[in-house]
Image (cartoon, rainbow, N blue to C red):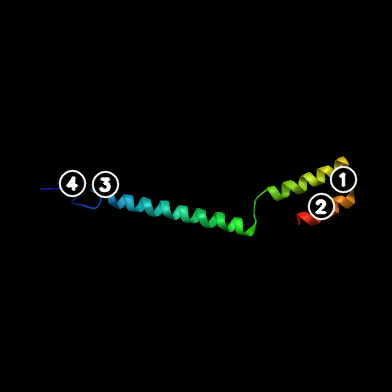
Amino acid sequence: MMHWFDSCTGFQGGGWMMFGMFIFWGLLIFLGFYLMKNYINGNNGPSRNHHIDILKERLAKGEITEDEYDRLMKKLN
């Protein structure tokens, strides 16, 4: 006589569920470490370069002088 809970895989896919949970939690932990590493190191992606590009564009348009450009670049770095 077989019961519905005779094997590990027969009980709601136990073996596969455990494998899936390991994958899920592993990816979640990896994502957490990855985001924290980038946050702590200040690697905020293209936003830093975006500010420098805006500054260069303002200099090219004549909105700021070279002295202002140099002063603002020092603040950004």
| Residue type, mark 3 in image | Gln
Label 4 vs label 1: CA separation?
77 Å
Q: Position of residue 52 (x, y in %)?
A: 77, 49
Mark whose residue sits in front, 2 or 3: 2
| Residue type, mark 1 in image | Ile
- SS of the residue under disc 3: loop
- SS of the residue under disc 4: loop
Label 1 vs label 2: CA separation?
10 Å
Label 3 vs label 1: CA separation?
68 Å
Q: Position of residue 43 (x, y in %)?
A: 64, 55
Q: Give left or right: position of 19 versus 63.
A: left
Would you say the residues marked 1 and 2 are in contact, meaning their CB atoms lie under 8 Å apart?
A: yes
Label 4 vs label 2: CA separation?
71 Å
Q: Residues within 10 Å of mark 2 (few under 14, many from 20)?
A: few
Label 4 vs label 3: CA separation?
9 Å
Residue drawn at x 56%, y 54% as measured from the top left: 35
Residue drawn at x 25%, y 50% as measured from the top left: 9
Would you say the residues marked 4 and 3 are in contact, meaning their CB atoms lie under 8 Å apart?
A: no
Residue under pointer 1: 64
Q: Residues within 10 Å of mark 4 (few under 14, many from 20)?
A: few
Whichever of callouts 4 and 3 sits on the residue coming sooner in the sequence is: 4
- Screen quadrant of the C terminus: bottom right
Residue under pointer 4: 4
Q: Mark number for residue 72?
A: 2
| Residue type, mark 2 in image | Leu
Q: Give left or right: position of 14 versus 52.
A: left
Q: Mark number for residue 11?
A: none
Label 2 vs label 3: CA separation?
62 Å
Residue under pointer 3: 12
Mark whose residue sits in front, 3 or 1: 1
